[in-house]
Image (cartoon, rainbow, N blue to C red):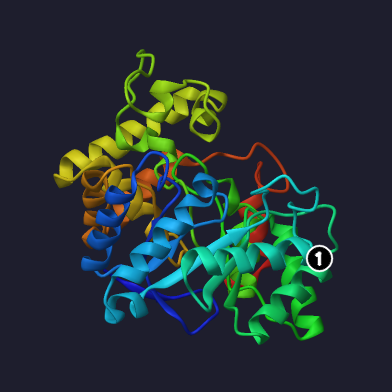
Amino acid sequence: MEYRTLGRSGCVVSHLALGTMTFGEETDEAGAHEQLDRYADAGGNLIDTADVYAGTRSEEIVGRWLADRPARVRDAMVVASKARFPTGRDVNDLGLSARHLGRALDASLTRLGLDTIDLYQVHSWDPVTPLDETLRFLDDAVRAGKIRYVGLSNFTGWQVQKAVDLAEFRGWSVPVTLQPQYSLLVREIEWEIVPSCAANGLGLLPWSPLGGGWLTGKYRRDEVPTGATRLGEDPERGVEAYARRSPLERTWDVIDAVRAIADDRGVSMAQVALAWVAQRPRVTSVILGARTTEQLDDNLAAAGLVLDDAEVQRLDDTSDPAPADWPYGGPGVDQRSRRLDPRST
């Protein structure tokens, strides 16, 4: 396992994180604890959860695992959680207001059995709550010892920049990470979000690095998804169905390229896809999400896989979302950038 600093902080985490969204729904408690044990044994130390995962059950499962393990294991873990979405029926049980976050943070601390959450992330942008109210609350929570670091999730580039600028101007705790959707099939964050994070020292914690299972090879051309998979059970399901909404030929081209490299290396397609994300600029830790321990074991094997330059270039070229025109693409963009930016020469 490789270790990297948690964005602009001095905290060190493994470059593969364990996501817990399946805990309490697709994975029962015994299976979840087995996954946590296997992850810790492999040298992983970053556990990512959220108050809405499985209706709060994910945090409870993680909390019971932490309580049942020796201090050396428990103390080694860096625990991350998130808040923003409702877990109850209160009209104020939503958003990034100080009222909602205060109640949500205390509830998460109780479920996790912790005095402090290492990384507390706002789960997405709130267009209603003033940003200074949110950031002031998070800074107060850091000063009170309830959280150690502030993180963002699912923010756009301008939202990241605004949060960093305001926190720095006010002298509040500055966000250290951003958790975005990122994979070979979802690369649009490279247009503005990644540059914004790079300019401000934020690390990336990519979620859905396997594209909802598409990059594992379990879906095939000209075959309607079936069976005990998310897309098989519901072909129109949420984020996993995005490949049907994007140019489908590109999706299959990416899958074919991943399969070819996997076959050449004698590894799984999932390991190739995870290794590609882990090698992207600004990535701190890639969030794994497995239903079973067997799936987790395969994912963890990506820790030792480093793609060479030719393999990375092949995947980059095949998966390029190719923005059509300005300001992200179009004829002459690269050439003009080289002429105007002496750093590119």
Return the residue at label 1.
131
Tag count: 1
Depth check, front residue: 243 or 252: 243
Residue at (40% x, 67% y) in the render? 46
Which image quarter: residue 137? bottom right
Q: Is residue 290 above or below residue 336?
A: above
Residue at (38% x, 36% y) in the render? 213
In the shown orientation, is residue 309 left or right of residue 57? left
Residue 195 percent across, percent down from the top left? 62, 63
Residue at (71% x, 79% y) in the render? 139
Residue at (36% x, 37% y) in the render? 215
Assign the N terminus to one quadrant of the image: bottom left
Depth check, front residue: 247 or 121: 121
In the shown orientation, is residue 270 left or right of residue 144? left
Question: Which kind of residue does numbered mark 1 sit on?
Answer: Leu
Which image quarter: residue 321? top right
Residue 188 percent across, percent down from the top left? 59, 46
Which image quarter: residue 63? bottom left
Residue 282 visible in the shown view: no
Q: Is residue 152 above or below residue 57?
A: below
Residue 345 percent across, percent down from the top left? 55, 69
Secondary element at tag 1: helix
**Residue that extends furthest to the left in the rendered view of this protein:** 266
Depth check, front residue: 159 or 107: 107
Residue 159 visible in the shown view: yes
Depth check, front residue: 14 or 198: 14
Q: Is residue 170 above or below residue 107?
A: below
